[in-house]
């Protein structure tokens, strides 16, 4: 998540939300994570023309889940930011996808805050993009395009290699892809 790496001395602020995902106050990133306060995040799944999904291996510099595999890009919402804006910002910051004015990835499905999401309410987005990608080395060690069936096999075979939130999201992605193919 790109909000994990900031310049020394800078403090990130998040909106703290209630059980209905309504903003109740603001708190620092440190306080939110230390005390398990509900907050907001986005994950974007980027697919190419062949149906492969881009996965990133998180940088070892990350404070949460360093070195684990994750969604194409993901991140916290900054205080005062909405989900759609955060999704577009994260695409640009982490993997270099700059969307045209007014263009945004498609909202796909929502996940309630829970322990596996790190107490984040999450909107999962999808986007079709064939590259190029420009990976931020502070955020991402490397990434690769992978067929969905291969992702499922890898997660089943080596679950410890994947972020907890990704392990929650991926079966939902597979289900949504299956529904789409039936239409």
Image (cartoon, rainbow, N blue to C red):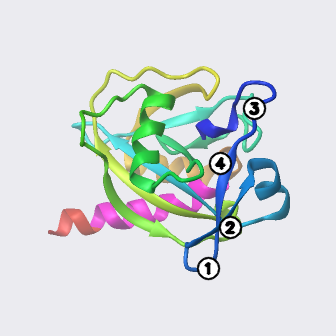
154 lies left or right of 46: right
Q: Earlier in the sequence, mark 4 or mark 3?
A: 3
> Are circles 1 and 3 on residues that touch, CB within 8 Å?
no
Calculate the distance from the C-alpha at mark 4 to the C-alpha at mark 1.
33 Å
- Residue 101 at x, y percent in the picture: 24, 36
Dominant secondary structure of the magenta stretch? helix
Q: Quadrant of the C terminus?
A: bottom left
Q: Quadrant of the N terminus?
A: top right
> Of circles 3 and 2, which is in front?
3
22 lies left or right of 128: right
Calculate the distance from the C-alpha at mark 1 to the C-alpha at mark 3.
29 Å
Q: Which mark is residue 7?
A: none
Q: Which residues are magenta?
A: 164-178
Q: Which residue is mark 1?
A: 19
Calculate the distance from the C-alpha at mark 2 to the C-alpha at mark 1.
8 Å
> Are circles 2 and 1 on residues that touch, CB within 8 Å?
yes
166 lies left or right of 29: left
Question: Vertical placement of 158 versus 144: above or below?
Answer: below
Res. 99 image quadrant: top left
Q: Which residue is mark 3?
A: 10
Q: Secondary structure at mark 1?
A: loop
Q: Which residue is mark 4?
A: 158
Q: Which residue is mark 2?
A: 38
Q: Secondary structure at mark 2?
A: loop
Q: Earlier in the sequence, mark 3 or mark 2?
A: 3
User: Which residue of the protein is positioned furthest toward the bottom in this rendering?
Assistant: 19
The residue closer to the viewer here, 174 or 119, is: 119
> Are circles 4 and 3 on residues that touch, CB within 8 Å?
no
Q: Residues within 10 Å of mark 3 (few under 14, many from 20)?
A: few
Question: Vertical placement of 112 versus 62: above or below?
Answer: below
Q: Earlier in the sequence, mark 2 or mark 1?
A: 1
């Amino acid at each position: 998540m790109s909000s994990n790496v900031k310049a020394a001395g800078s403090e990130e602020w998040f909106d703290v939300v209630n059980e209905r995902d309504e903003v109740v106050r603001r708190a620092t990133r440190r306080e939110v994570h230390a005390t398990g306060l509900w907050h907001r995040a986005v994950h974007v799944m980027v697919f190419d023309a062949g149906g492969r999904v881009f996965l990133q291996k998180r940088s070892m510099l990350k404070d949460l889940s360093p070195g684990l595999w994750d969604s194409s890009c993901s991140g916290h919402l900054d205080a005062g930011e909405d989900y759609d804006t955060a999704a577009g910002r994260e695409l640009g910051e982490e993997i270099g996808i700059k969307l045209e004015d007014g263009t945004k990835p498609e909202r796909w499905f929502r996940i309630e805050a829970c322990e596996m999401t790190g107490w984040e309410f999450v909107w999962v987005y999808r986007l079709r993009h064939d590259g190029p990608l420009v990976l931020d080395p502070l955020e991402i060690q490397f990434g690769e395009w992978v067929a969905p069936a291969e992702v499922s096999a890898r997660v089943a075979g080596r679950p410890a290699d994947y972020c907890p939130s990704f392990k929650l999201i991926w079966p939902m992605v597979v289900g949504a892809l299956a529904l789409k193919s039936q239409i």
